[in-house]
Image (tube, coloured by chain):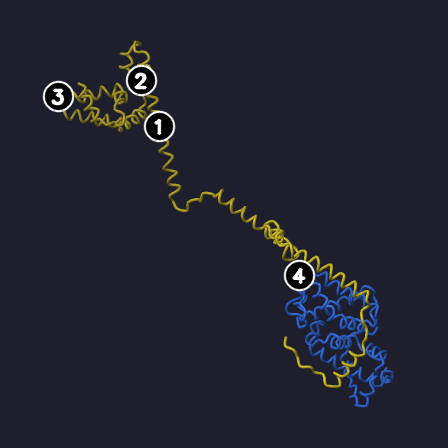
Chain colours: A yellow, B blue
Amino acid sequence: MSKQPNPLDASEQQLIEHYRTHHDLQPSAVTDASIMQAASAAASAAARAAKKPAASSSALSRLHAWLFAGERGGRWPVALASVMVIGVAVGLVFNTVEPEPTNYDGPAARQYAAPAMHEQQASKKVLERSQAQQTPQLSAPSAKPEMEAAAPAPMAPASVASMASSAESKPDNLQLAVDEQTHAQLLEILDLRKAGDTAAANARIQRLQQRLPALDIEQQLKRLAKER
Amino acid sequence: MTQPGDAQIDDSELLRRYRLGDEDAFGQLYQRHRLGLLRFLHGLCNDPVVAEEVFQETWLSLIRSQSLQREAVQFKTWLYQIGRNRLIDYWRKHGTRASREDQYDDQLHAQPAGEATPEQQLSLSQDRQRLDAALADLPLDQREVFLLRTHADLELHEIADITQTPAETVKSRLRYALQKLRRLLADPAAEEVNV
């Protein structure tokens, strides 16, 4: 703010000076002494505080000074908020939730994974079942081996079909996958072809194919032809 | 310690030195402002005992305070602000505010007092009691402005800061105070006639 010019004229200034010069009130000596004594004590304390900068420069004292400086409430809320923010950040880093896929890749992958596992389990079951059928032959070779080889356990058409579908990867089990009736029909077809009756052979093949759609008849015929 | 010959050091620097432990710096500050502050307080309350008590409290509160005064405010303004507030606190505490401390009425005190003639000015009383009595006749607002101008030697804008009053109001109060004092001191019977 700029100083304003003195608005007083000479007579007014004279009156003020008159009051100044004729006022002789002074503080008592006791008041002067008490004030100077208090000032001296405060100055000594300030001088002592100024001579101890090392004690106040430690990290702990600086933290203490920072926390209790500032406004009325100090800086505790700021420090507490900082710790909470750090805690939330650490929690988010170590507990990240895997995001749900927004495209169609995720569900498709799951649907694809389940049948694969099912197929694997199914093939494992077939393998175990076939091993269970072979095990008596190995463990008891003297217990009517001819009968067991000639009369395999009856199987449902569906199981035959499923086993036939996996016959390519398991040629050793191929013979077990064909039942006696089918085996006889295949031999008949071979005989008809050998006799030159192709029409009758094809008719038998069609009927057999209708009964067992999954069976690879031609492959079975080739195998039987080789065995003969 | 305060060096000899540094009488021109301003109040802010002396206060800074004192806060660092320089006792002599405080001594200089005290010598500069002790008379003005006491006479200002005495003029306001018109009681030497109360004035000295408030005077002592003012300096002790300044000593206890660890803060430097605000940058934009002079030490003197700060000191008189503390003294004024301490006196108001005393009045509130003791309920002894003078009956003449009514709010200043511009309309009432805007009446022309008449210019003092040279003869009247020459006849200004030098009697201390007459000076004090004339001062006590002033409304508190006018008296405060006059005392701050006389004993603290403050400018009008500084008085406006202390009293938290517009500068134009301070200016008019000072003029009315001077006119009334001149009239009272020139002719003590004038006040009795007016009353």
Mark 4, residue position: B20
Secondary structure at badge 3 equals helix
The residue closer to the viewer here, A24 or A215, is A24
Chain to which the residue tagged by mark 1 belongs: A
Q: Amino acid at mark 4?
A: Leu
- Residue visible at 66% across and 73% down? B8
Dot 2 and dot 1 residues touching (CB under 8 Å): no
Q: Are marks 4 and 3 in contact (CB under 8 Å)?
A: no
Identity, as a three-letter code, of the amino acid under mark 2: Gln
Mark 4–mark 1 distance (CA, rounded to whole Å): 92 Å
Q: Secondary structure at mark 1?
A: helix
Q: Is residue B3 left or right of residue A104?
A: right
Q: Which residue is mark 1?
A: A122
- Residue in the foreground of this view, choosing between A28 and B76: A28
Q: CA distance from mark 3 to mark 1?
A: 42 Å
- Residues flagged by tags 4 and 3 on a common chain: no
**Residue at image point 32% right, 18% down:** A133
Picture quarter with the C terminus of chain B: bottom right
x, y (%) of residue A199? 15, 26
Which residue carries the number 2 mark? A134
